[in-house]
Structures are given as structure tokens and as C-alpha cells.
Image (cartoon, helix red, strand yellow):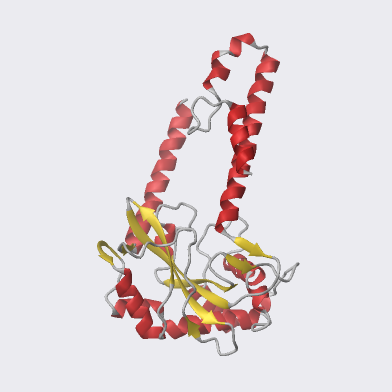
Amino acid sequence: MLKLCSVLLIKLNLENNSNCSIPVSAYKNRRTFSDRKAMSYLTGRATLLVLLAALLLSVYSAAEVSVRTDTSYKYLDLVFEWAPGSCYNFTYCNKEIPNTWTIHGLWPSVNYTQYPVNCAGTCAPDIEGLPGDLVTKMEKKWPNFYQDHDHEGNEKLWKHEWCKHGTCCSDLLSSPLNYFNKALSLYDTISLDTTLKSAGITPNLTTSYTFSALNSTLTSALGVSTFRYWCKQVAKQQVLYRVGLCVGRSTEFNWQDCPGGEFHEKCDQERQFYLIPMSAAAGVFFNAGLIFVVFVRVFWMI
């Protein structure tokens, strides 16, 4: 596949391979073509560029994860999300986001890059049939804070997590009710906000923290020593936005060490990290809106 990508780059004969734009020569020679031939020339180049981008994306994706077609897994990864960190420098979040660690999902996994998905084929969980008290807890502890153009709100995230991940651990959690209840129960066991706060790890822009301090805090709370962390790189600094805690594949659901290994947006534990406060995340929405207004003004002036 990489060879094919190289052939396409040679075929395009781009004057600057680092810039995915139409070759300048196409514009310089435009007077030597009829309008029809010029359009065909540019369209052909654009098509090749799209094909090249798709191939490169498939190579990158294949290197990141290996989706399994069977239902085997070794443990479950309870993934917590810090919305201010996830939404920092990211404009596809709602204007109102939670200021607490929330659940993103409970993922049956073989390791960080291999896991079964969509094990039930067609999937249509009856979210409306869930007990009202459970839904109330999920709205607080498992919210969907990303923009939802389908207007499904929290239900969109809950359906996605059950269908993609929950159906693959049905040997332990046979229904959406069991799956959601267990995730919430594990979430309450650790109380991540309280645990971090008690160790002095609080959201702010002026103090960074070491992963040794974070590991020590979680080890004291759970009795295991290896965890999974996701970070964004912002102004050459690490911003922590997800934490994964691993649970054994058994009916006891005991905490266990995460397996370790590489994955996309893995934190460098040799460096310190920041925990972005709500005020900083809110500022991004304002700045993004301001940029949008400026863009619209410029567009109408052209």
C-alpha cells in the first residue's frame, strides 16, 4: 500500500510534496488547454489527491488499531474522560460541558490496540426502557458533551457504547441494563474527582503534575500499579484528558494492572502534564466563535 502511495505521488508530480494542493504548473499552462481539457486535467489531479489521502489514512488507521472480528478479550477498560481537557482547542463540544470526570465507556479489550467491536451485528438497545433512576445517574456521570446534529443527546453515546463495546462482553454483562449498571458501579468505586483532589491534583493552568504522583494516587486507591493515560499536545505541553482503569474478565470485576503498550495520543510519562480547568475550556468556545465571525466577515467581503 505504501508503494502505491509513492507511485501516486510520482504520478501527481507535485512541485511541493508537503503541500496537498493542485500543482502550480496546472495554472501556469492553463492557456494551452481548452476549458474542457483544463477542467479534466484538474479534476483528474484532484481525484488522485483524494485517493492518495484515503490510502494514507487507511495505512495510518491500520497502524493504530486492529479491530477483531471474534469476541475474545482479556480484560475491560473503564475509560474516564475530563471534558475541559477533551474540549480544549476542539470546537465540536457543546457549550455546556461537565466539570467532573465522567464515563466514556467500558471496553472489552485484548490490549490497547486490539479489541472486539459490534459483536451483535444489528443493535437497537431500548434506552427508553431503562429504569428512570439509572438514566438520571447516567445523565450526570455518563453524558454526551460532543455536538450532536442528530439531536439524540446522551442516548446517542449510550447506544454507541453498548453496541460497539457492550455487546462484546455479553458473557459477563448480558444486557444494556447490566452493562450500564456495572460501569456506574465501577465509576463510584474510585470517585476519581475526589481521589485526585485529595492528592492535590486539581485543574489549573499554572501547576503541572508528574505521572509518578498520579500513579501513586491511583495505586493507593485501587491496589494496582499500571494505568492508561491519553494526552493532547498543546503549546508543547501535555494535557491529560482521559484515564483508563482496567478490570479483570471475571464476575468479580476486580481491578487489575493495564497491559501497557503504545496507542494514539498516549501520554509520555517521563514528562509532566496539566489538567485544564473549566475556565480555560470555556475560553476556547469564545475564541472559536470569534474566529467564525471574522471568517464570515472576510468571506462576504471577497
Using the image as rendered, state which of residue 241 and residue 19 is in the foreground.
19
Quadrant occupied by the N terminus: top right
Residue at the left extreme of this rendering: 206
Residue 281 in view: yes
* Position above or below: 281 against 192: above
Residue 255 pos. (x, y %): 48, 84
Residue 127 in view: no
Residue at the right extreme of this rendering: 122
Using the image as rendered, state which of residue 68 and residue 41 is in the foreground.
68
Which residue is painted at 67% across and 69% down in the image? 163
State left or right for residue 201 relative to residue 148: left
Using the image as rendered, state which of residue 284 and residue 89 is in the foreground.
89
Which residue is painted at 58% across and 19% down in the image? 26
Q: How many marks?
A: 0
Residue 132 pos. (x, y %): 60, 81
Using the image as rendered, state which of residue 161 and residue 96 is in the foreground.
161
Which residue is painted at 38% across and 52% down in the image? 284
The quadrant where residue 82 appears: bottom left
* Position above or below: 7 against 165: above
State left or right for residue 118 relative to residue 17: right
State left or right for residue 164 relative to residue 86: right
Residue 199 pos. (x, y %): 29, 78
* Position above or below: 275 against 57: below
Residue at the front extreme of this rendering: 3
Residue 256 pos. (x, y %): 48, 82
Which residue is painted at 59% across and 86% down in the image? 250
